[in-house]
Amino acid sequence: MRRRDNLVGYLLITPQLVGSVLFVLLPLGLVGWYSLHEWNVLAGTFEFVGGENYDRLLADANLPQVLGASALFSVGLVVLNLALALLLAVLLNQRLRGTTFFRTVFFSPVVVSLVAWTIVWRFLLQDDGGLNGLLAAAGAEGPNWLRGEGTAMLSVIVVQVLKNVGLNMVLFLAALQGVPAQLYEAAELDGAGARTRFLRITVPLISPTILLTSIITVVGSLQVFAQIAVLTQGGPGVSTTVLVYYLYQQAFQFHHFGYGATLSVLLFVIVAVLTLVQWRMRRRWVFHET
Amino acid sequence: MKPFVKPAALALAALLTLTACGTAGGDAPAAQGPKPLRMTIWTSNEAHLKLFDEIAAEYRKTHPGVGEITFDPIPFESYTTTLTTQIAGGNAPDLAWILESSAPDFVSSGALAPLDDTLRKAPGYGFDDLTPSAVKLWQAEGKLYAYPFSTSPFGVFVNTDLLKEAGQQSPAEMIEDGAWTWEKVAAQNTAVVAETGKAGMVVRDFDYKGWDNLATVWGGWGAQAWSEDGRTCGFDSPEMVEAMTFLHKSIFTDKAFPGPGTTADFFAGDAAMTITQISRASLLQEATFGWDLVPLPAGPKGEYSVIGQAGLGVFKNSPNAAAATDFLAFFTNPANSAKLAAYFPPPRASQLTADTLAKSNPLLKPDQLQKVVISGIEKGVVKPNHTGQAELSQTVRAALDPLWQPGADVKAVLGGVCAKVAPMLGT
């Protein structure tokens, strides 16, 4: 009987399993295999070069800048996204009129097509675009957002935060509503102020959600591509060339497919390590798990 | 099929069987019956496609062994990337247009089949009619690897209404006075911007990224991105510094060119002038303003012209390579070349006359054709190109970015470009 159950179970997970093997595990293995080769698509050559691509990775003069840009983007995005999402969630968790409207407003960008969203922002952010028009009407001269060394990265981060903050906001909102009201009442009776209540009750109780959103956001931030491709193409200079965009350039624009695969392996390692570290840390700072 | 593609192909085949969503793939082995051909192109213009389909239909009448001939448009911006991705995925087309920027990569890679023998043997083809300047880019070791399908000179389209509004001389008058020079043209554009609030001179497709289009400006100073043999960086040459200093001043001080991050479409009437290829004339079909097409302004080094090219090649590894080469010979024979000349200036000397071109370019006057197109093709230099162009182009783009700031130190930035580029040119 037990065997039969197992069989049915395996049958039920087969579609998902086949999908995972074909689209996740197999490509993962192939990328590792490709990274050991010099693959010239045009000439149709595919030669085993062993660790040569990895030597190149270590010697790549562009890589420190690229990793720096990736780190800046990820840190900026995670900090801004989580802080804003939590703030919005706390505000929208109040029993006030109009909260449903605002929840919808902040969530709606999540369902908008990423590329459409980004293209609209490109128009808003260009030198003679909407944002600078608004600033000019207010008597201020805005910078050339997508062209300045500092403002380009800032623009990409903000556009991405506004796109996705709604998702984290909803997750936080759900977590906030799961915090028992009597804890606040008790704390209030004990004389705790709003700040203390937030830090000592709210944050610990929603810490599993903070962990979840930070993992999703960190991993998502390392995969940013369309926003860079549409807004800045990695410029000005290489200031917004993040790892995924760099590996796209190497593989698909410069035809270094082997080296592109090597960069993918690096990206995989970074994502895996970061996720593992966050997961390990949960015991320390996640107060309770459900 | 190469061994490394096998696991991926097997997986894909398994997947397609599983999901039963396999499309009628172009490379499915059709053991019997007519063999289809697929050609990737960058245009999706209806008139262009209609003409291609007509030529293909005519060819198939006499070649029952050839099945459907598909023209597969890929957007210009991502053309080469998409094409190489198709090749990497084992789904290469039989024929492809190749843009001049990637010509050295494709020609030297060995991916393309040599065309000389088939073209020379084709009856009435007139192989020697192809002008040497047009085929140069597509040859390696004396063999032709792609047919110079479109050889399109850059010219200046001028909105004569805007110039009049700003009280400026028409380009025709300027040329007559020998005043059609960069200095005077820039001043005209500055005046138009001040008087009308519209944009001045737009170097089309440059947008502060596609720097190779600036060859249409710095050519007037005799500057080059790199030397003829492709080994020495030219960005720090005195000519280039002078040309770029002029350009920088014209953009940021005189406002003769729209600055970075500003969009202005000449063909919508938003700008006084634009530098682009003459094939864009079709965009003026419904123009509501008066316009003229004139040669590039003269620079300190005198007159010059620049051409953009696209080649048409056959992939050597295609199972239908022989049929594809034969179709190419038909597609580009004198009769069809004359038809294609309506949109794509031909590389054939006998067809480069104002009369022939006028028949197929009703929007352009014979005088415009003679001055811009015919003499442009005869004297023109091709835009910068090099093996590894994509990577080189990206490096130059990044190193040039600091130039597009109001207070940039032109000489220092250009020196920086060479510092980055020189190691890549050496190989």
Image (cartoon, rainbow, N blue to C red):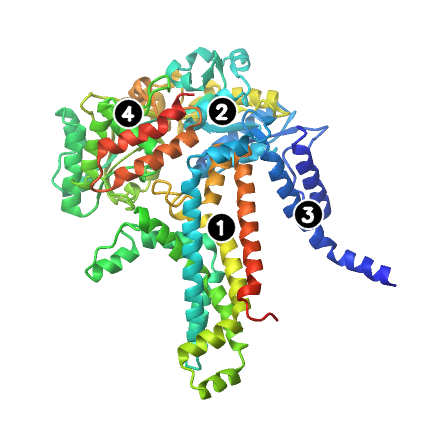
Give the labeled residue for mark 4. B372
Residue at left 39%, top 52%? A156
- Residue at image x 44%, y 82%? A95
Whether B379 is drawn above or below A16: the answer is above
Gap between marks 3 and 2, in whole Å?
A: 35 Å
Residue A122 located left or right of residue B38: left
Q: Position of residue A135 (x, y in %)?
A: 24, 59
**Residue depicted at x 17% and y 27%:** B181
Spatial CA span between label 1 and label 3: 23 Å
Q: Are marks 4 and 1 on the same chain?
A: no
Residue B409 position in % (x across, y down): 21, 36
Three-letter amino acid code at the position of disc 2:
Phe
Q: Callout 2: residue from which chain?
A: B
Q: Are marks 2 and 1 in contact (CB under 8 Å)?
A: no
Residue B106 is tagged as 2
Q: Is residue B268 above or below residue A198?
A: above
Quadrant, the C terminus of chain A: bottom right
Q: Secondary structure at mark 1?
A: helix
Q: Amino acid at mark 1?
A: Leu
Q: CA distance from mark 2 to mark 1?
A: 33 Å
Q: Are marks 4 and 3 on the same chain?
A: no
Question: Which subunit holds the residue at mark 3?
Answer: A
Amino acid identity at mark 4? Val
- Mark closer to the observer (3, 2): 3
